[in-house]
Amino acid sequence: MHITLEYKSMSKIVFSVSELNQSSQKLLEEHFPAVWVEGEISNLIKPASGHLYFSLKDPKAQIRCAFFRFQARSLKFELRNGLLIQVLAKVSLYPDRGDYQLIIEQIEMAGDGLLRKAYEELVAKLTKEGLFEEQQKKPLPRLPSCIGIVTSPTGAAIRDILSVLKRRFPQIPIIVYPTKVQGAEAAAEIVNALSLANQHRATDVLILARGGGSLEDLWPFNEEIVARAIYQSAIPIVSGIGHEIDFTIADFVADRRAPTPSAAAELVTPDQQHWLQQFSLFEGQLTHEIIKYLQHQAQRIDWLLKHLRHPGQALEYQRQQLTMCENRLILSIQQFLKEKETALKNALRTLETISPLATLDRGYAIVFRQDDGQIVRSINNTAPGDLLDIQFKDGKVSAQRTTQKTS
């Protein structure tokens, strides 16, 4: 848009301040149509008149705005400093002060503001339906037979989770259900992964996780379809999404919420060393109670011997027999407990040998296709030119298939 002002060169035109401001106002209002402007609210003022005054700013500039009462009544959300909004406004000038300003006709939320509004509306809806009720939560198994992980196979979250599981109880098998955790397709993939895990029923607890990010990054975990899939899961779900300060709708629906992916792994696994210590403690307590009982019986026999004049020799013989039985019983119990401890350790070693983590430790690797993140179990699942990721126990490399299949 070009505005041309023509002046006669032969005459001198002098404006008063008010005339200049009024002319500028007229030019702005006549030559600028209503425009949409996006910015952040600052210096918000709410006088008793009901009009709203504030500045709209971005990192480089700001402009004054006026939103008059009769239009502000239709506003469906409360304005506050720092809120990112989009306004439909006319460009104008306040002649009394010469301030360049926007006369606002309509306001809408923008960016995170829109997401926050959608988040709050869905929280209210699901709360009313009872999806967050504590009595709906399923208990977690004390010792899982298999743990499922729903997350990206290439993110930091999976590495943190596997590290914790290996440290705490490496014998428990793990199944990873790979999915996107960010972007437009992520919510549907998360729902599919949860559905697949429930169809397989190979796990008795699931970890739903991803690393930190902005509200937009975490948005798939605020989608209604994800919330309902978590609620409908027959397998208990522990959420470990973002950082400790991040809360998503998935956290509210999940059976347990952990502040981080690592903390989620801590929640679903017992500490192997702690369990072994408990077994040793129970062994000592049981042995102590048995000895205490036998000693009490021995004292009772001694008391009976003192109060019986005869047949003393028979009682003495019985006392000796009881002492021998006591010693044999103690030895038998100790041997029995040692055998059970050995059997438990052997079982733990057996579990460790079949663990996916142990497989990687023995030099094997897992191959993924780069385009969809699927595990490659056969050469027939690849074609020449396919890009592959090869996961070792301590890292990952990329490769490309260059040859035809050989017979």
Image (tube, helix red, strand yellow):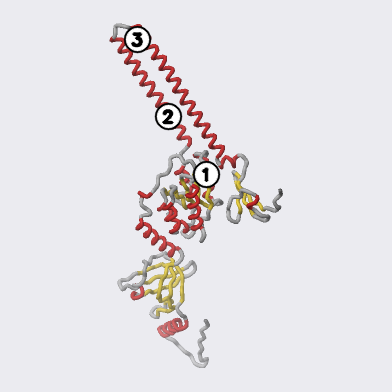
Q: On screen, 193 above or below 47?
A: above
Q: Is residue 321 left or right of residue 175?
A: left
Q: Residue at x 39, y 21 (%)?
A: 291
Query: Residue 76: percent from the left, percent from the top?
Result: 36, 68
Q: Quadrant of residue 42?
A: bottom left
Residue, far left: 307
Rounded to the nearest whole Å, what is the CA distance between mark 1 and mark 3? 62 Å
Q: Is residue 267 left or right of residue 373?
A: left
Local secondary structure at mark 3: helix
Q: Few, some or many C-alpha atoms within 10 Å of disc 1 (few <14, some 14-19, many ≥20)?
A: many
Query: Residue 58: percent from the left, percent from the top?
Result: 47, 68
Q: Which mark is residue 315?
A: 3
Q: Which mark is residue 281?
A: 2
Q: Which mark is residue 127?
A: none
Query: What amino acid is at disc 1?
Result: Ile
Q: Residue at x 34, y 17 (%)?
A: 297
Viewer-nearest residue: 143 or 216: 143
Local secondary structure at mark 2: helix
Rounded to the nearest whole Å, what is the CA distance between mark 3 and mark 2? 37 Å
Query: Residue 316: percent from the left, percent from the top?
Result: 36, 9
Query: What amino acid is at disc 2?
Result: Leu
Cβ atoms under marks 1 and 2 closer than 8 Å: no
Q: Which mark is residue 174?
A: 1
